[in-house]
Image (cartoon, helix red, strand yellow):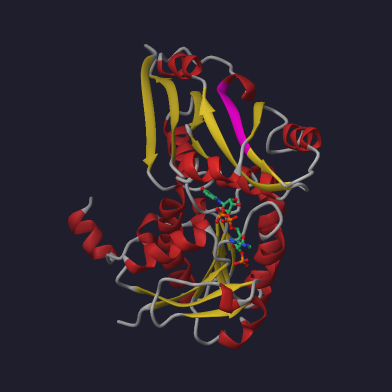
Amino acid sequence: MDKIRIGIVGYGNIGRGVEQSIKRNADMELKAVFTRRDPASVKIQTEGAEVKHFDDMEAMKDDIDVMILCGGSATDLPVIGPKVAASFNTIDSFDTHAKIPEYFANVDKAAKEGKNVSIISVGWDPGMFSLNRLYAESILVQGSTYTFWGKGVSQGHSDAIRRIEGVKNGIQYTVPIEAAVDQVRSGSEPELTTRQKHLRECYVVAEEGADKAAIEEAIKTMPNYFDEYDTTVTFITEEELKANHSKMPHGGFVIRTGETGCEGNKHVIEYSLKLDSNPEFTGSVLVAYARAAHRLSQKGESGARSVFDIAPAMLSQMTPEELRAHML
Ligand code: NDP
């Protein structure tokens, strides 16, 4: 069987996570990594795969089945997403929740014009958490749903910090507030504000001479990312960052509690993730959805999709017959 030929666009944490996942999927092969930097400066870990400049992608139109877009959500994907969807099937992990409808519309237009399939906002949140919220709410139609993240590094928020003027490096931890988690698990269906559920802890390395007060203000007031949370900003050195904050664990849980029947029987649905490496896990989800995009494209479909539109069997290396025999 021919392998599914993958291109990675943007080689940061997620790009490297995708590369590792491809090595563990026997039906996939990495053909090329595309970067906006000088390709000679980007060292990858897959023998036989090429590193090319972003502008040289068109020439590989016949050599790649699916492009996995690994740029940041804040400023990369809104531009790169529609651009690449015009020429290739794409997968991305766009995670600016408030802008997903607008992003979907832009990618959908480009993908339809190019007759390609693009699955957007794939990962764990948005992604696997979104799917589990949908399943839980479709089953327990009366109840309340809660999502808690962390404690862990949010790459989207860290990426957003690093793009602020005067910031050399930085990392952000999302921390669930335990009292809120306990209340939810009790089934009491509390009403919790965004601020009551999580804290955001930021560790920032400033450039020499940078205005630290201005950086702190820019972080704390950033719309969609920090303005609705209690946020702490701690300035540290590059050495401290490397020594104490170089790992990228994450996790969290989706909980829905609700009632059924005339006696009000209570139910709790909980989906939880405990991830040693957020980028390697997110990369693994992206790769599974790349398989689905390839299959949909081969069927002649085109346009944008979200995880809600993809049948579970499309993700698996097994055939529908094998799945029915082994997993039902
Ligand atoms: P990075 O900052 O590591 O990478 C983003 C881009 O920056 C890369 O694609 C790369 O593009 C460029 N880059 C990377 N390293 C360097 C460098 N040393 N010098 C210059 N440029 C560099 O971001 P992540 O990979 O951690 O995250 C990407 C996005 O993934 C996040 O913004 C987030 O939105 C999303 N995400 C989504 C999740 C979900 O569950 N849906 C979960 C986790 C993340 P290039 O090669 O072109 O220079």
Quarter where residue 314 is shown: bottom left
Give percent across and percent down for residue 178.
47, 18
In the image shown, does 90 or 111 lie closer to the viewer? 90
Residue 88 visible: no
Query: In which quadrant of the rendered view does residue 263 lie?
Result: top left
Which of 186/196 is in front? 196
Q: Quadrant of ligand 1?
A: bottom right
Taking 181 as reference, is 92 left or right? right
Let me know if residue 1 appears in the view.
Answer: yes
Image position of 245 with respect to 11: above or below: above
The structure residue drawn at horizontal position 43% and vertical position 22%, both measured from the top left corner, is 257
Residue lying at 39% horizontally and 13% vertically, measured from the top left: 264
Decide whether the magenta segment is chiefly helix, strand or loop: strand
- In the depicted view, which residue is nearer to us: 177 or 241? 241
Q: Nearer the viewer, residue 260 or 149?
A: 149
**283, above or below 291, in the image:** above
Task: Estimate the x, y position of residue 308 in percent, counting from the top left.
Answer: 50, 50
Quadrant (top left/top right/bottom left/bottom right) for the N terminus? bottom left
State which region is magenta. Answer: 197-203
User: Is 218 situated above or below 162?
Assistant: above
Q: Decide if residue 218 is on the left or right side of residue 17.
A: right
Q: How many marks?
A: 0
Q: Position of residue 231 (x, y in %)?
A: 66, 27
Residue displayed at 40% across by 74% down: 46
Q: Position of residue 239 (x, y in %)?
A: 55, 44
Asked whether residue 306 is drawn in magenta, I would say no
